[in-house]
Image: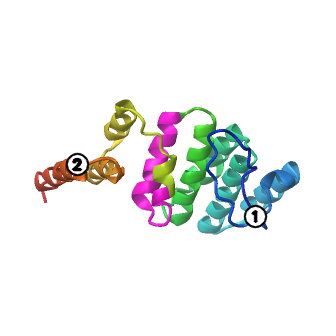
Amino acid sequence: MKINYVESSDSFYYRENNTDKNATNLDYNKTISALTSLYNAARNPEIKQRYGYQLVRFNHYTRNYDAAVQAFKTYVAPIRLKGAPYIMTLDQLAGAQRGLGMNSEANWNFFQVFKDSRSRKESAFVSMKLSDTASFNNILKRAGTNDEKNMAYFLLGYEDFNNPIPIMEKCLKSILTQKF
């Protein structure tokens, strides 16, 4: 499944595989009904979370951003599992939040994906909008652990145009001041 592609002056998508189904070609009500029914029938929390992911993803891809955010709150968050499906769902949630103009929340969730995923690290980094100091500072303020703070500083070093040495020195200083 893929999101409905809308060409714009800022588009830079590379369309590798054109055999994917466009989410907007599916019957919205029928798909939501089927996914909700499967979610409700599942007893295993991991399976339920995967159906919750599909509900968030489908709403994001059909640009029903409010419904995607609500689906996350209703179907994924209450399960409280933090594995790979949760991280994948956060990625979709952040995209929906970006669509709603909730940039600070989107950046935080993309940051969580960046921090906790190997395969989606670059995509999450590109999706974050760290175009100003305030965006970075918002992430740094929300970082609750030293690991999160170090990863936030790592974001700055991850930029191609930055000199990563001062950023890495801050990370090292933070690590050395931690109590073990």
SS of the residue at dot 1?
helix
Residue type at mark 1 is Ala
- Quarter where residue 136 is shown: top left
Query: How far apart in space, not on screen, are marks 1 and 2 (Cα)?
Result: 49 Å
Residue type at mark 2 is Ile
Dot 1 or dot 2: first in sequence order is: 1
SS of the residue at dot 2?
helix
User: How many numbered discs sit on the rendered protein?
Assistant: 2
Residue 160 in the image, given as x and y percentages of width and height = 36, 52
**Tag of residue 41:** 1
Q: Is residue 142 left or right of residue 79?
A: left
Residue 10 in the image, given as x and y percentages of width and height = 61, 40
Main SS of the magenta part reads helix
Taking the magenta stretch, the answer to whether it contains residue 115 is yes
User: What span is colored magenta in the figure?
Assistant: 103-122
Taking the magenta stretch, the answer to whether it contains residue 4 is no
The residue closer to the viewer here, 64 or 134, is 134
Q: Identify the residue under disc 2.
A: 167
- Quadrant for the C terminus in the image: bottom left
- Above or below: residue 44 compared with residue 92: below
